[in-house]
Image (spheres, rainbow, N blue to C red):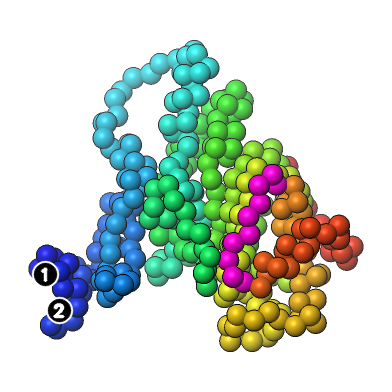
Amino acid sequence: MLDTQINDPIGSIGVRLEDVIDGFQNAMKDFELPLTFVVGTGEEAGMDLYTITSGAARAYLRDRLTPPRQGTFNFMGLPSELREKILKMLLVFPKPALTIGDRGTGSSSSESRKLGLLSREDQVEPAYGTLFSGQHNRIVVEPLEKTLALLGVSKQMRDEALPLFYGQNKFRFGSLDHLRTAITKMTYKTIKNIQDIRIVMQDHSSSRRSLQGYRQLSPKNLVLLVPLHSSFWHFCTGSNEWESKTPTEAQLEKLDPLAELWDIVAVARRTKHLEIQGPGFLGDWLRQKIDSEEEMPECTEDENMDD
């Protein structure tokens, strides 16, 4: 029946794969299998596609191909070069990135914020040239508690491992809300190690104050994704009708007091390599503010965070 489904996804009676195997993707979660679900387009229209990228497969299989062996050895007694290679195997994940974002699959709120691998491609990231809405996290990686427990073994281990995890992984945040939540849970020292970050400019709040943690963020690479459908359009226009035209000048002025946006502008000014992608009107506002010498309005207050 699956062969028939592949050759004729609609079929004479409209049978689809999700009907043949009810809850197929959810069942795979029980085995922690990093399965991606997408709806086919073009010749694959109407077909439910279930795929696994080679990068996600490596992250899943690395703890399963070789059974654990009992024993201990003096890890810190190894040469520093060998320790670094071992730590990279444990802490550096495949491209394109570790992603924090809503999964969009009906998951519970606690599950929707797990780290995951986003793209179906192993190396190529979507260009988002025609992005209408933010990408959603589709593949959940295994919990990182055990892996990151390495950071608590000793001060030397932390000093060696922390820059590898935060400095050599790419981090993608599905919204400003996800980014802010993560930043408030990190120390300033940790934030300074983040070198590659991608942010979907969505889900802002006009009541948020400036966050001191953002001032520690100075990545080498920063990509700001500006979707056409965003909370900023509704904030400026008061309309839920998504349009491609730019809000009026008076409507755009509503963005000027937003401390959260000015925090992002400051991060963008510090980064070495900046990209702004997507068709949303916010892109032009960001480019103008980043290139200008305009400073954050004094009326915005700092939100303190303990280091």
Image position, residue 262 (x, y; %): 77, 61
Q: Where does the C terminus fall, quadrant-wise?
A: top right
What's the residue type where badge 2 is placed?
Gly
Q: Secondary structure at mark 2?
A: loop
Q: Which residue is mark 1?
A: 4
Image position, residue 195 (x, y; %): 62, 42
> As rendered, which of 14 and 24 lies closer to the eye?
14
Q: Secondary structure at mark 1?
A: helix
Q: Which residues are magenta?
A: 271-280
Residue 223's image quarter? Answer: bottom right
> As rendered, which of 119 and 205 lies closer to the eye?
119
Report whether 154 appears left or right of 5: right
Residue at 52% in and 63% down: 128
Q: Residues within 10 Å of mark 1 (few under 14, many from 20)?
A: few
Q: What number is the disc on residue 208?
A: none
Image position, residue 37 (x, y; %): 33, 63
Q: Which residue is mark 2?
A: 11
What's the residue type where badge 1 is placed?
Thr
Residue at 31% in and 23% down: 70
Residue at 55% in and 37% down: 168
Image position, residue 105 (x, y; %): 39, 68
- Residue 181 can be seen in this image: no
Residue 174 lies within the magenta run: no
